[in-house]
Image (cartoon, rainbow, N blue to C red):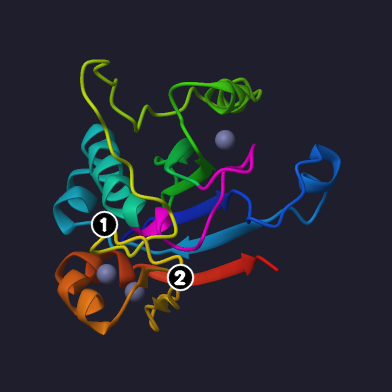
Amino acid sequence: MSNDTLDLTVKIYGSAASDPLDEDIRYSEPRRHAVLELRPRIPDVLNASRDQQALAEWVKGLIMDLLPDVKHSAEWYCEFCDKPSMETHEVMMGWLHINPPKLVVWTHHVCDAVVGECALKLKDFDSVPGLPPSVPMIPPRDPSKTYTFPLARTCLYCKNDSSEQQMSRCSRCRLSRYCGTQCQRADWPRHKKVCKMVDSATWVWK
Ligand SMILES: [Zn+2]
Ligand SMILES: [Zn+2]
Ligand SMILES: [Zn+2]
């Protein structure tokens, strides 16, 4: 009996610059997406305590750690329009009481997850029967402040807009993208936690 890893699946949806805006074409199967299978190790103390609340908190922190890597995994465009992706929106469903605990995360790449037409379209995902309301990953915005969200096509570390440049992908997880080895090395202390839990990444891309 092994209860020491979380069975985590992340499904990423978005589009590419070349995708037609016609919804019948864009949403026909197989729809553009990536599937990540991850097996993060559950800390021993959580395994021993079987405290569901504490496990849920740990899972939430884990997802927050994972989000930057998911966002910068490819040159994603908005799922609904022809603008580059600036943000991601997460919908989750968990079965943390089973053995091993299971979590599925649907990640949607969008131009703007808070304001505008595409933000409204995101609300449809919250009304899927059987799915709980999405976890609000994007904090409420203060209208008096200016926010900058790096494009999904930028380097995961320096957030440099490298659209003109060939990006390199982490050879172990085949997920995180960098403008060069210098940025990859600099990001390793942060990225290694995510990198080591990636079992596989399947792309339905071209
Ligand atoms: Zn959009
Ligand atoms: Zn860089
Ligand atoms: Zn990696």
Q: Earlier in the sequence, mark 2 or mark 1?
A: 1
Q: Quadrant of ligand 1?
A: top right
Q: Residue at x 28, y 21 (%)?
A: 141
Q: Is mark 1 within 8 Å of ligand 3?
A: no
Q: How far across and how far down the image is residue 80, in percent?
A: 64, 37
In the shown orientation, is residue 143 left or right of residue 201? Answer: left
In the shown orientation, is residue 76 left or right of residue 70? Answer: right
Q: Quadrant of the N terminus?
A: bottom left
Q: Is residue 172 magenta?
A: no
Tag 1 secondary structure: loop
**99 over 146 or under it: above or below:** below
Frontmost residue, 2 versus 36: 36
Q: How far across and how far down the image is residue 122, in percent?
A: 57, 27
Q: How far across and how far down the image is residue 49, in percent?
A: 18, 44
Task: Read off the magenta span.
Answer: 69-84
Q: How far across and how far down the image is residue 171, in percent?
A: 40, 84
Q: Quadrant of the C terminus?
A: bottom right
Residue to which mark 1 is pinned: 42
Q: Is residue 71 magenta?
A: yes
Residue to which mark 2 is pinned: 164
**201 over 84 or under it: above or below:** below
Type of amino acid under label 2:
Glu
